[in-house]
Image (tube, rainbow, N blue to C red):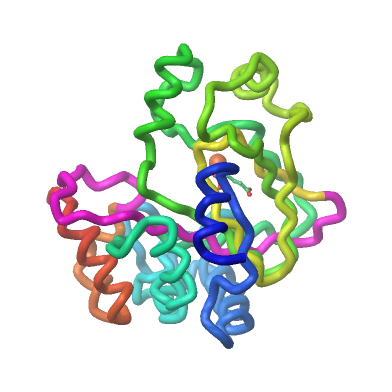
Amino acid sequence: MAYAEQAAQYYEDGYFIADDAFDPGMLAPLAAAARRAVAKVQSGEVVAKTEGISTGGPGDNTRDILGLIAPEFGEPLFAEYLGCQAIERYMHALLGPDLRLGWVAIFAIPGPEAYDTGWHRDFSHEERDGSKTVEMEILGRHRKGVVKWHMALVDDACLWLVPGSQKRYRTAEEREALINEHFVELSDAVQVVLKKGQTVFWNGNTIHRGRASEGMSERLAMMGALAQHRDSDSPQQVAERFVWRMADNICDGLPEKTRLYYDRWRSLQQD
Ligand SMILES: O=C(O)CCC(=O)C(=O)O
Ligand SMILES: [Fe+2]
């Protein structure tokens, strides 16, 4: 499928699946680096907290490993992956020529554990039970210009979403699932089934759910995001989960493209 068609599908359905969203030769090294990063966090060799990345501390069994571009991880491949040409081509088709840092993280569920987020939109602090006017206003504004993705490092069928729901008010059935009973089947939902190496680019404003798939033995996925950049974008308060990125040592080791994404992000953060 051509990039323009995939971009059209993204804006219509809220997602598309790509087979080639990493530079040649990156897949096996990324999986190996991800396993090392998970082991470092579990052992406490690296302590990755939203407020800062450090070394030598208590181990942690978090499922969401952040801070991968920090030098403490000693894994430069993550920053290369975020800035690689294959990702850049998709982002240019979706967001235009100028990009800035979103994030890169790992999703790790080590065994056949129960995992279920329940139905939600990624609304963070926005109103979750608004009127049609309120919800449509949020959908038009919230995380505009940000595209996120999951790349399966092992086969991954955890994500479910309702195609097109990023563009419209929720139905009565969806409201029940979003507000009251999060763990039900939704009639219009689809399961996103990824083979190892496939990437789903998707909009977190869709109604979606992450759920351990049947017979799953492990989940290991990269999560990434980039944002559209304009020099005229307004400065922001540093988001709580990105405070670690204000450390002086983050930018030095970054490859050229990721450094550009980082510098643009950094220039908009109020100290
Ligand atoms: O587990 C998943 O695939 C989805 C998790 C989720 O809600 C998200 O990434 O926003
Ligand atoms: Fe979500």
Residue drawn at 55 percent across, 78 percent down: 33
Q: Is residue 37 above or below residue 9?
A: below
**Quarter-wise, where is residue 151 in the image?**
bottom right
Residue drawn at 50 percent across, 37 percent down: 205
The spot of residue 78 in percent (x, y) is 45, 74
The spot of residue 178 in percent (x, y) is 61, 24
Q: Is residue 253 above or below residue 211?
A: below
- 33 left or right of 53? right
The residue closer to the viewer here, 182 or 2, is 2
- 235 left or right of 60? left
Q: Residue furthest bottom?
A: 25
Q: Is residue 198 above or below residue 203?
A: below
The spot of residue 155 in percent (x, y) is 75, 65
Asked whether residue 1 appears in the rendered view, the answer is: yes
Q: Which residues are magenta?
A: 214-242
Q: Residue 231 colored magenta? A: yes
- 133 left or right of 6? left
Residue drawn at 53 percent across, 22 percent down: 169
**Quarter-wise, where is residue 60 in the image?**
bottom right
